[in-house]
Amino acid sequence: RAHPVLPDGLGWRNAAGNVLGVYLHGLFEDPGVLRALFGAAAPTLDSVFDGLADFIDAHFQPGVLRSLID
């Protein structure tokens, strides 16, 4: 017989120690899910990182980020 080990039934364990849970990796990277949950399309992760790279390229002097790491 299994018993819950997480609130709201999100994880269960039986007497042998086997666990049953919910795994939602990547859920918020699916445009259809984002549209269904929030009512609008969201930018992809790649486009967000591309925009960040463009901003850094336009506003930082070459070598500034490297100097912060060193």
Image (cartoon, rainbow, N blue to C red):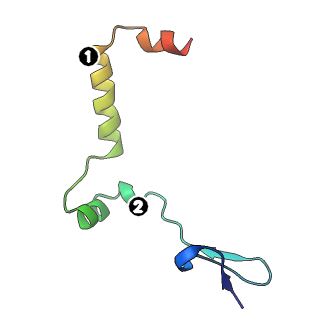
Question: In which image quadrant can residue 26 be found?
Answer: bottom left
Circle 1 Cα neighbour tier, 10 Å, few/some/many (<14 / 14–19 / ≥20)? few
**Residue shown at the point (31%, 38%) measured from the top left:** 48
Q: Position of residue 39 (x, y in %)?
A: 19, 63
Q: Position of residue 9 (x, y in %)?
A: 55, 80
The residue tagged 2 is 27
Question: In which image quadrant can residue 19 be found?
Answer: bottom right
Q: Is residue 8 above or below residue 47?
A: below
Q: Is residue 50 above or below residue 34?
A: above
**Residue shown at the point (49%, 59%) measured from the top left:** 25
Q: Earlier in the sequence, mark 2 or mark 1?
A: 2
Q: Position of residue 58 (x, y in %)?
A: 26, 16
Circle 2 Cα neighbour tier, 10 Å, few/some/many (<14 / 14–19 / ≥20)? few
Q: State yes or no: discs 2 and 1 in contact (Cβ < 8 Å).
A: no
Q: Amino acid at mark 2?
A: Leu
* In this picture, residue 17 sits left or right of residue 36: right
Marks 2 and 1, how far apart at CA: 32 Å
**Residue shown at the point (25%, 51%) measured from the top left:** 42
Q: Is residue 10 visible?
A: no
Nearer-the-camera pick, 48 or 69: 69
Q: Name the element at disc 2.
A: helix
Q: Is residue 11 above or below residue 65?
A: below
Q: Position of residue 57 (x, y in %)?
A: 30, 17
Q: Is residue 66 above or below residue 54?
A: above
The residue tagged 1 is 58
* In this picture, residue 7 sits left or right of residue 45: right
Q: Amino acid at mark 1?
A: Ala
**Residue shown at the point (53%, 66%) measured from the top left:** 23
Which quarter of the rendered picture does the C terminus lie within? top right
Q: Which residue ends up furthest to the front in the rendered image?
A: 7
